[in-house]
Image: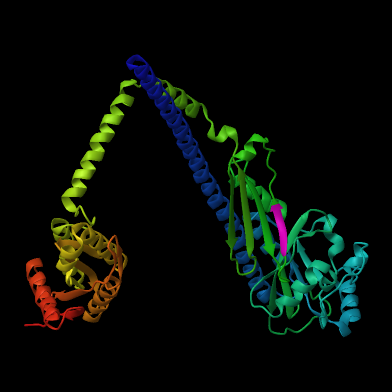
Amino acid sequence: MIPGTAVFGRRRHLVAFSAIALGLIGFSALLLLKSEVERQQTRFSESVQTVSAVVRNQLDTNEAVVAGFSAFLQAVDQSDTEAANRYAAAVLAAYPQIYMLEAARAVPRADQARFEEQLRRAWRPDFLLKNFPTLAQQQDAQQASLKETWPILFMYPALPQASAIYGVRLETVPWLSFALARTHDSSRPVASPVFKMYEGDNAYILMQSVTRPRQAQHEARPNFFGNTMVAMLVTRTDALLNAVNQANSDPWLHVQACLQTVSGDNSRVLSTVTPATGPIDSLLPRLTERVELPSASQPMSLGFTRQLRIEDVLTVQTLLILVLLLGALVMIPILLVKHFNAMKRAEDEHERSAYLASHDVLTGLPNRYRFAERFAQAVTAWQDTGIGFAVLLIDLDHFKQINDQHGHEVGDQVLKAVAERMRRSTRSRDTVGRHGGDEFVALIAQLSDPASAEFSAARIFEAINQPVATEAGTLMISCSIGVALCPLHGQDLDDLLKAADRAMYGVKQLGRKGVRMTEQG
């Protein structure tokens, strides 16, 4: 029997050690993987901040440039395209991400023929006012209703592939018509949806309404810049995509940007291309974040996605640490498992001893020593905050008769029931303890006013004054409660207990079964 028992014990220890070792390995592996994931999350957040800052800078630059161009158009002579070209050249040299600066002017519909004839005579013999659908061989689309026509008369740089755009009525361009109408109602620039340009590539236009005092017209010179104009900044989406790719050092980070247009729709500006991930990678977290750029004229939403890969979290360093950890766990002496049980027994015994030293054995409530500790904490809190507390002394009425008639075992059942009721009728920050025999004490913490103490005492009173089921049958019990307030009736535990005892004695004199507050002497 003894050898078999010893073998069984060794096997049990071995199984326990193996389970612990495997658990530690698994837990350590999870911690290592979690650490790597957190490191990738930090890198992801840094990339998001970097890319967002680059895009925000591009949007701010667009607004600044279109504001400057608008101010220039307010001052330039109506036919001075050379000055406009010099200005635009300087801007594009400083900001190469801007594709083109354009300007269109308002022409009353009744003056279209005369205006067209003037520009043919003074500027281009082949000048015509054009509708964009006819030029691009597209079907007519819905347009905003405008009182004037808005031909495009200035473009920089003057690209050969875009020369056909001169004279195009801006209101006939489907993706610009409603943005143009919106500029009249807004003092801020207005962004168009993303569209495919006549000469190719995708872009969007930032438009700003420009109005200046009327000037005398010279029939001999072309009137490119009238009294009412719209300044336009053309941004190619490829330029913004290149800026994002240059700022982003993580090839696995997918970035998508959408522009909120004047119609409230989201128009996709860019979407980066990332390599495909493997099926095992899908088991790892997918990092996502959305950043809203609340630009006044180009509100843009950036979406960031990063699928973590096995290579990101299972690095060579991580594998090395796991191997070393496994070796260390294998080397742990089996003797530690045997000592574990002894240490556990000692710990349980210590906890039990500490509990018995501070709690009543019968009811499980804090004893006088524990109650004194809680009282000291309440005094410190009162001194720090100025919020007082109450000490209640609770005495069971006619408890001696219960012991005499039914025995101490039934009396103990009553005391346990009372203790449980007091626990349930007080708050977690309050303390209920056994003072001795059939007397209990309660510390009601953080009282805003004396009425709160009486309310708490009444709640305890109602909880105790209920029938108790015992081995001797259902017994009716009641109690007398005295209430003392700190600092009104004292600041010392003995003083407050004496004050509560006087109040409780007053209840006894009046026939028991009640609650009374200590009278200030």
User: Which of 443/115 is in front?
Assistant: 443
Residue 90 in which image quadrant: bottom right
Q: Position of residue 180 (x, y in %)?
A: 76, 74
Q: Give the residue drawn at x 46%, y 39%.
A: 35
The location of residue 342, given as percent across then percent down, is 26, 30
Please say whether residue 339 is visible from this viewpoint.
yes
Please name the predominant secondary structure of the magenta segment in the image: strand
Q: Is residue 394 left or right of residue 181?
A: left
The stretch in magenta equals 266-270
Q: Position of residue 224 (x, y in %)?
A: 78, 73
Vertical relation: 519 (above or below) 366:
below
Dividing the picture into quarters, in which one does residue 187 lie? bottom right
> In this view of the protein, which residue sits in the foreground, 231 or 499?
499
Q: Residue at x 67, y 37 (%)?
A: 277
Whether residue 471 is situated above or below residue 123 in the rendered picture: above
- Residue located 52% across and 49% down the image: 45
Q: Residue at x 64, y 69 (%)?
A: 297
Count of picture labels: 0
